Amino acid sequence: MNHCKLSWSLALATAVALTGNALGQSKSPPTTPPTTTKPATGQKSPATGKASAKPAAAAKTTAPAAPPPAAVSAEQVKTVYVVPMGFRGTGQFGLDIHPSVYEKVAADVAAKKPDLVVFVLNSADVDTVAYMGDDPREQGVFDDDSIRKMTRDLKASINATGAEQVMVVRDAVGYSALLGLSWPDMYMTENARLMGLSRIQERTQVEDPEVFAKFREAFVGICNGFLVSGGYNPSIGLAMMRPEKMLSASFKGREITWREDDKGTWIVDNSDKKFAGFSAQSAEELGLSDGTVADELPAMLEDLMYQRGFREFQRMPEDGELLVQEYVDGWRKAYESCKKSFETYREAIGNASGKDELKYLNQAKSTIDKVLALMKKYPAVAIRLNREFGASRVQLETEALQIQERIRGLRKAPPSGGSGSKGSSPTGPGLGSGG
């Protein structure tokens, strides 16, 4: 009898061992953990400054236990929706990154309902960058009202779908740094920068010292609103925007205290003549970013998902990259078309006299109407044309009306052998003469 019991016990133990072996083999992740991840557990160093602001952050760094194979379902594979904010070679803040396209992105996210939306920010305009060169006209523009509304509405509409949101900063130099710090869950790529908010000085330069002080305080407050919405200390923004402000940090376990001086244990900025900025390494060590990921897709997503504790994910085949690329290509092509149209317009107005006056006035009117249509379709075109050619939408609409009046007058007037009205053409100040 004892011999039989022993045999059954050995058989049962063998079966359990074989079952455990099979389950252990099934747990290997479909995506090999990236070598760029520093801690094997996906966690940061203890000195993180955002732990208290985001109490749930610690939980997301621990990979969930894998269930038995029979329990795995398609719903457990995270779906990822990527939203570029600028591409290499483009990335003008306020132009390539414009509310008009992100309204479409928000609607697309609402329709497709991904589990995670990943914004990838690539916009640098206060440094030597390929698309800018030495041309200041390639710098981004900041309409604080529209960008603030864009950010608020974008986050709210995606939250309504139940999707998580993550910001990955590939490069943010200039006003784009405000976007990078607008999302609580923020990561940076290996060579990313987060700096350049010295640009706010362009908006606050006035001669009167009292007006300057009030104007600067108001504008800094507006810009710091982006950081506050992301859960970051306003002292960080002050040091990034005002040269006389210093910045340091002190640690107590996982808690961080930011100081507007150089008395902390970690000095970020101890000069009254420079602006604070962060690299990927310093941002992670100070807790601004949740981690560092690879620079290029798909390795970026592999790093990101692994650090967030998910080993299985699927990027949606048609996500925000398609919409944003179509928009960027569209407005830039439209802008080039408008520059050529200005040449056509000037030539037509110059020829609008004598027996061919009506013919060339119609050509000039048609050309302006085409430009106005493109300005309406792409607000970025209107911004760029106004900045480079002094051709605002209101100005072009006024000129179109003036040309229409000349056309109407010529059609009503009796035929004459005169030389027409050369010299009375409504050419606006500098229209089409710049660039």
Image (cartoon, helix red, strand yellow):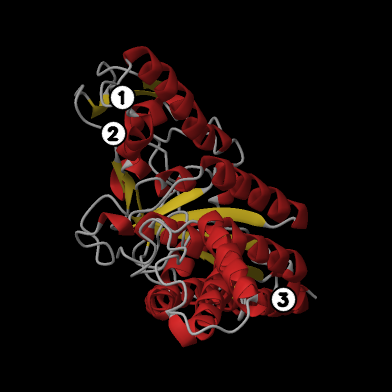
Cβ atoms under marks 2 and 1 closer than 8 Å: yes
Q: Nearer the viewer, residue 136 or 162?
A: 136
Q: Which residue is mark 3?
A: 12
Q: Quadrant of the N terminus?
A: bottom right
**Disc 3 element:** helix
**Residue furthest front as drawn:** 417
C-alpha span from label 2 to label 3: 65 Å
Q: Position of residue 37 (x, y in %)?
A: 38, 59
Residue type of the residue flagged with mark 1: Leu
Which residue is drawn at the image coordinates 31% and 54% (left, top)? Answer: 125
Q: Which mark is residue 247?
A: 1
Label 1 Cα neighbours within 10 Å, binned few <14 / some 14-19 / many ≥20: many
- As helix, strand or loop, the secondary structure at mark 1 comes to strand
Q: Earlier in the sequence, mark 2 or mark 1?
A: 1
> Which sits earlier in the primary sequence, circle 2 or circle 3?
3
- Residue 161 image position (x, y, % from top left): 76, 57
Q: Is residue 186 above or below residue 369?
A: above
Q: Residue at 52% of width from left, 41% of height from top? A: 144
